[in-house]
Amino acid sequence: MTDSPIRIAVIGAGPAGFYTAGHLLKDEAGGHGADGHSINFEVDMLERLPTPWGLVRSGVAPDHPKIKSVTRIYEKTAAHPRFRFFGNVVFGEHVSREELLEHYHAIVYATGTPVDRPLGIPGEELPGSHAATEFVGFYNGHPDHTDLEVDLRSTERAVVIGNGNVAIDVARMLVLAPAELAPTDTADHALEVLGESRVSEVVIVGRRGPAQAAFTNPELLELGELSDADVIVDATELDRALAVHDAGAEENITSRRNVEILRSYAERTPAGRAKRIVLRFLLSPTALLPGDDGHLAAVELAHNELIADGEGQLRAQASGEHETIPAGLVFRAIGYRGIPLPGVPFDGRRGVIPNDGGRVLDGPGDDEPSEIGQRRGEYAVGWIKRGPSGVIGTNKKDAQETVDAIFADASAGGNDLNVPDSPDGAAIELLLRERQPELVTYSGWEAIDRHERALGEPSGRPRVKLTRIEEMLRVAADG
Ligand code: NAP
């Protein structure tokens, strides 16, 4: 049997893409198929930005540098002789799915879920109302969000909608002391805006109760340890929100611990710090209200009760009461969504690529659906496969499932992988360079990385991020 390598294109250089590449290039992966022929993978990673690491670079909060150190594992994968990085290449723009299938046995979509889920309420588009995704990108120096206009000078109160870790990250970033921000890799433009902030109160609003919150324990605990902000929980509201018994939450260790932490916050006497984070529950925003100047001025919220839905879940249902919280800023942190990729099936309801354990399934619009309902040689991994849940490490296991599927399909004699006309590494590189003369290779990224670290060194910061594509390309070319 042939020993020629199986060529895989991974689209997206975030954690899911890198874990996929890592698993494919592990020695054990390059083993033998069921029929005894040896399997060797070659991985090319295509990424729309000149920089790798996805949400590790542009999502993880800047004051969490330890989480970012996971890139050392990805760097080892990138150093593998059968790995190549093609940055600044947009799937569907510089190269199509069909063209990639001429050159690769399989494509793995690892494009994540880059946009926010909308609330679907009046006033959502008012100035002062922001998607958390944009603000997170802004403070992390994502080039798409460098020019975001976020006015932290005209209001003292911000409301963050959602009870997940993104809501916590946003709230924390809004109240961190300058001394806490100074040693981080927060983008310079964001340091300037945050440095001039007049926001002194951040209200985090959950539509259900504390026992149903999606926070993880360390993140919730961190709110109680901030040098410039008190954390405020109203004991009466907490009791009301906990009055409905939730058997699921009782069994869930994270949820039980969250409730303990919140009770301890409710018992605290505020230390009189300059800023406050207030955690509120059982409230759903119903409208964002403008002031006379047309800018966001207040959030109208409906009070909720928890109602069992008969499927073991507690749902929020409006009780008929309302309240209005004056606020000049709202950050909507109610989850992310995937966006469709040209030529790739998409489940618009869930915002993911339909798949079975990573194998992409035919879409309703497919002209010639396959007999097995599966797109031959196409796979998904990470958030675009399963939706935006879990921490970075969750993607390692998720990637293993997708790689197992690829390996199984390859082992069956290659029958279920795509059969490319031109499985030739040089040919695809030539095509990509033709289409995108400013393609950034891994050594180009290494030049950007060195440059950013050198900029950070004098002030003891891990790096000063380049936030414009043109700057990145210049540095990549010079390096
Ligand atoms: P998430 O954990 O899914 O939380 C989304 C929150 O939005 C939930 O509280 C949800 O409430 C609420 N929500 C949804 N629709 C809503 C609506 N229409 N109105 C009001 N509230 C609504 O999502 P995330 O915060 O975006 O985080 C995504 C993933 O990244 C999570 O797995 C998270 O743990 C992870 N992450 C981890 C870290 C870290 O480890 N430090 C940092 C950031 C993110 P319901 O429960 O009622 O639906």
Image: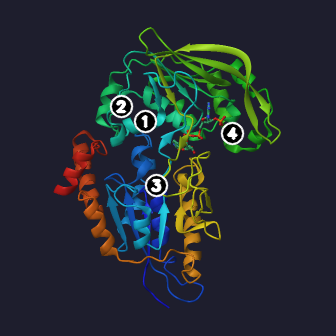
Residue matched to label 4 = 255
> Which residue type carries mark 2?
Leu
Q: Which tag, 2 or 4, sits closer to the chain's start?
A: 2
Mark 2 neighbour class, 10 Å CA radius: few under 14, some 14 to 19, many 20 or more: some
> Which residue type carries mark 1?
Glu
Residue matched to label 2 = 148
| Label 3 – label 1 distance at C-alpha | 23 Å
| Label 1 – label 4 distance at C-alpha | 28 Å
Report helix, strand or loop for mark 3: loop
Residue 376, position as x, y percentages in the image = 55, 70
> Which residue type carries mark 4?
Ser
| Label 2 – label 4 distance at C-alpha | 35 Å
Residue 102, position as x, y percentages in the image = 41, 72
Report helix, strand or loop for mark 1: helix
Considering only vertical position in the picture, is 464 above or below 383?
above
Circle 2 or circle 4, nearest the eye: 2
Q: Residue at x 47, y 74 (%)?
A: 105
Residue matched to label 1 = 134
Mark 4 neighbour class, 10 Å CA radius: few under 14, some 14 to 19, many 20 or more: many
Q: Which tag, 1 or 2, sits closer to the chain's start?
A: 1
* Disc 3 + disc 2, Cβ < 8 Å: no
Considering only vertical position in the picture, is 260 above or below 8?
above
